[in-house]
Amino acid sequence: MIHARAVVDPGARIEDGVQIGPFAVIGPGVSIGKGSWIGPHVVITGNTRIGEQCKIYQFASLGEAPQDLGYRDEVTCLEIGDRTVIREYVTISRGTPKGGGVTRVGSDNLIMAYVHVAHDCQVGNHVVFSNAASLAGHCQVGDQAVLGGFTLVHQFCRIGAHAFTSMGSALNRDLPPYCMASGNYARAVGINRIGLRRRGFSGDTIRALHRTFRHLVDGRDRQQGLEAVALLAQAHPEVADFMAFVQESPRGILRTARRRFTG
């Protein structure tokens, strides 16, 4: 199951059923879970944990030192969950001490070719990164978000659950959950209706989220918007999540092209 031309350090922990292709390099601090497949020429180094039944394609580089000028070879980690697919030339760096020390990618994700996930990022489950999407350091991506090809995300930005970015979006603010963004620099353009329908959200919930978007993203005054959707939040937990994300946003949220909050 481990090709004769692979280089696997004796200190690496390789579980049952793992396949490792030729010319792959596996470092001493690496752990690979049961049934995972590591393609040829993959490099996995540092304190990196790969979950079960993952597939990592050729020329991916995982767990290398972060691209951070303040990093001084401290011991930090990369964690990848189960059943995540990582395609060709993906790079995912381990964390830094000032960012908590751990870069974390969840389970059941599809990470397409040439994606970069920088140090200390926190990525949820069932996320899709289309080709060449990139996260700068300390970003957060919620469950079931979809990043379009060549999406760029500024450091410390957050993307909420079930959000969607179109091809070539450049985000320098937080994108609330259930919303879509487009453009360079990106603007919020509405609720991710198609994605939410596909995932079984009811029409009532989608309409409630649309009203929330109108008040919190497209509205002029944030406090008035929060008051306007307070009753909706009691009936729809998704609206409550939306409100909490906006209230907790340290960088501010993406707005529509027409209006800006005064508060």
Image (cartoon, rainbow, N blue to C red):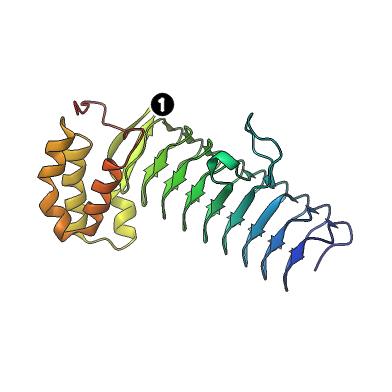
Note whether residue 195 is visible: yes
Q: Residue at x 18, y 45 (%)?
A: 212
Q: As drawn, is 211 to the left or to the right of 137?
A: left
Q: Residue at x 35, y 36 (%)?
A: 250
Q: Residue at x 52, y 61 (%)?
A: 108
Q: Quadrant of residue 171?
A: top left
The one nearer the camera, 44 or 98, is 98
Residue identified by numbered label 1: 184
x and y percent of residue 39 in the render? 73, 56
Note whether residue 118 is visible: no
The one nearer the camera, 143 or 41, is 143
x and y percent of residue 87 in the render? 63, 50
Q: SS class of the residue under badge 1?
A: loop
Q: Quadrant of residue 214?
A: top left
Q: As drawn, is 16 to the left or to the right of 199?
A: right
The N terminus: image quadrant: bottom right
The C terminus: image quadrant: top left
Three-letter amino acid code of the residue under disc 1? Asn
The one nearer the camera, 39 or 91, is 91
Relative to 217, residue 100 above or below: below
Relative to 133, residue 236 above or below: below
Q: Decide: few, some or many residues near mark 1? Use Cα within 10 Å; few <14, some 14-19, many ≥20.
A: few
x and y percent of residue 27 in the render? 78, 53
